[in-house]
Amino acid sequence: MKFESDVIVVGSGIAGLYFANKLADLREDLKITIISKNSWKDSNSIHAQGGIAVVTDLKKDSIKEHIQDTIKSGGGLSDPNVVKMVIQHGPKRLKELMGFGVEFTKNENGQLDLVLEGGHSTKRVVHSNDHTGLDIITALHNYSQRKKNITFHENQQCIELLKADDGSVKGIQTLNKIKNRIDFFKGKVVVMATGGSGQVYKYTTNPNCATGDGVSLGIKAGAMISNMNFVQFHPTALYSDSSVQLDLITESLRGEGAYILNSKGKRFLLNYDSRGELATRDVVSKAIFEELSSSHEKSVFLDIRHLFVDEIRLKFPRITSILDKNGIDAKTELIPIIPAAHYQCGGMKVNERAQTSVADLYAIGECAETGLHGTNRLASNSLLEALVFAHQASDYIALTIDQIEHDDVSLKQFELSNQRELEFNELQNIIKNAMSKYATIHSLIEDLYVVKMILNDCESFIRLIEQKLVISEPYLRTYNCLVVSKAIVDAKIQELEVKKN
Ligand SMILES: Cc1cc2nc3c(=O)[nH]c(=O)nc-3n(C[C@H](O)[C@H](O)[C@H](O)COP(=O)(O)OP(=O)(O)OC[C@H]3O[C@@H](n4cnc5c(N)ncnc54)[C@H](O)[C@@H]3O)c2cc1C
């Protein structure tokens, strides 16, 4: 089937919804279509716990300090102009978000309650208890439902970015999972808001939808990709013998004073960094990986026994239900944790207006590389980045879209197949296991060449079992994971080769 609109938004996380709501308010005459590959709820955004880093208390905090913390966390590779722009926008974007109906937790004085997270020099993370993402997405979705010029299409997976003769993107093709057919969406511009790629690793905090589709589609369309080597591992994912999509234990607990202990019951982070448990995620995760590799244990432990656990239970209802579900009594027991793939710092390279290197293709949120994060995202800066770049894109598109025409594109002829699901699942597991073993933050160059070989074998196998343009959901999932894994590994190899020389 064919659908036509002015703007196509791919993804219904915070970036896609906030962008669409803003543009719909700015230009009521524009037709905006949001497509999402599963239910509108399925995203990384809905799982966000900690909150949004924004300077709101100018007595105790400043824009300058937030900028410094961000640059320090990013290992000197952040773009200072972008950092300044994003942090300066923070307070306005937060206010706007509240205007869309999001309510944040207040303290006893009726002011926004602020929490401390790793790498921040002061308390500045605004939150809605520990289910910030759920509250944001629910409010943004409710708002979008009231906008007459926004149309939703769920269970539509973008499988191709379609270019006109002049090279600009003028539509997409999707796998309609309900009708089991290929649909065509025609638009003047396409905004990718497809999120991250944690699912290329075995242990991840990301849901199943996070298979890096934006980067994979971007590569196919010739968009510039950058910083894919900087995959962030969250240090405190709840270890489980039976599960690979791990529950996150929010960083705010360390802000409250939680310790990380090794299997001998000893704190060890101060041996790695003077900030101890409140060092940035890259430092804490690397220290834990080293501790695990020398002890050969399966996990380290988060200890909150010395804190007022009853108060913590009230303040962190989501964490409480995760611990209860896993039968952990945090008053008397330690919480087993491991680092898990959490956030893609790299992505489609964009400028300050969220434009990719391909005409009329925009990228916002986790699938974009804006220059903010450098080597390591500062905690709770990603929701902020999504808001700021969605704002930038909506403002720019509202101003310029009238100069853009619809254009013809040639459709690809895909054939649908329901076969080989088991083979693709097996292949995806091979990729995930290889990435987790050989492409983490402490990988050596030899490890990376091993995983590169494994990925090349997987690619040959995919080509063998699936002819070109015969697609299925398992094929797309596996193919996207493969493309993104290759981009991560190649970028990591390049980084280490440069360091070697
Ligand atoms: C457990 C967890 C906790 C977190 N906590 C925080 C926090 O406290 N603070 C913070 O700043 N950050 C946090 N993050 C990171 C943050 O949530 C994400 O970076 C952010 O939500 C990404 O938003 P997004 O809109 O770019 O992508 P997402 O929210 O992931 O949305 C992507 C959307 O694109 C859709 N999609 C993907 N591929 C396709 C396709 N091919 N076709 C159609 N649709 C597609 C998905 O279905 C989804 O709707 C957390 C992440 C996780 C996983």
Image: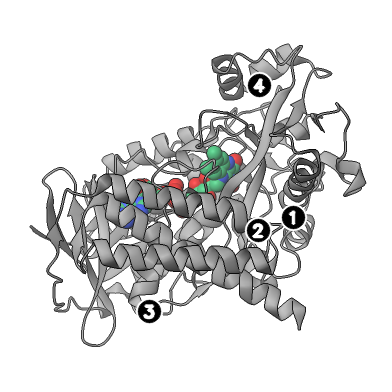
Where does residue 435 sit, x and y in percent of width and height? 55, 55
Question: Residue at point 60% right, 24% down?
Answer: 319
- Residue where numbered disc 4 is placed: 315
Question: Residue at point 39% right, 41% down?
Answer: 140
Q: Is residue 53 above or below residue 167?
A: above
> In the picture, residue 165 is in which quadrant?
bottom left
Label 1 SS: helix
- Numbered tag placed on residue 271 in the rendering: none
- Residue where numbered disc 1 is placed: 66
- Numbered tag placed on residue 87 in the rendering: 2
- Residue where numbered disc 3 is placed: 222
Q: Quadrant of the C terminus?
A: bottom right
Residue type at the position of mark 4:
Lys
Where does residue 397 sit, x and y in percent of width and height? 36, 69
Q: Residue furthest bottom?
A: 166
On the picture, is 353 further left or further right than 71? left
Give the mark nearest the N terminus, 3 or 4.
3
180 or 347, which lies in front? 180
- Do the CB atoms of the residues marked 1 and 2 lie less than 8 Å apart? yes
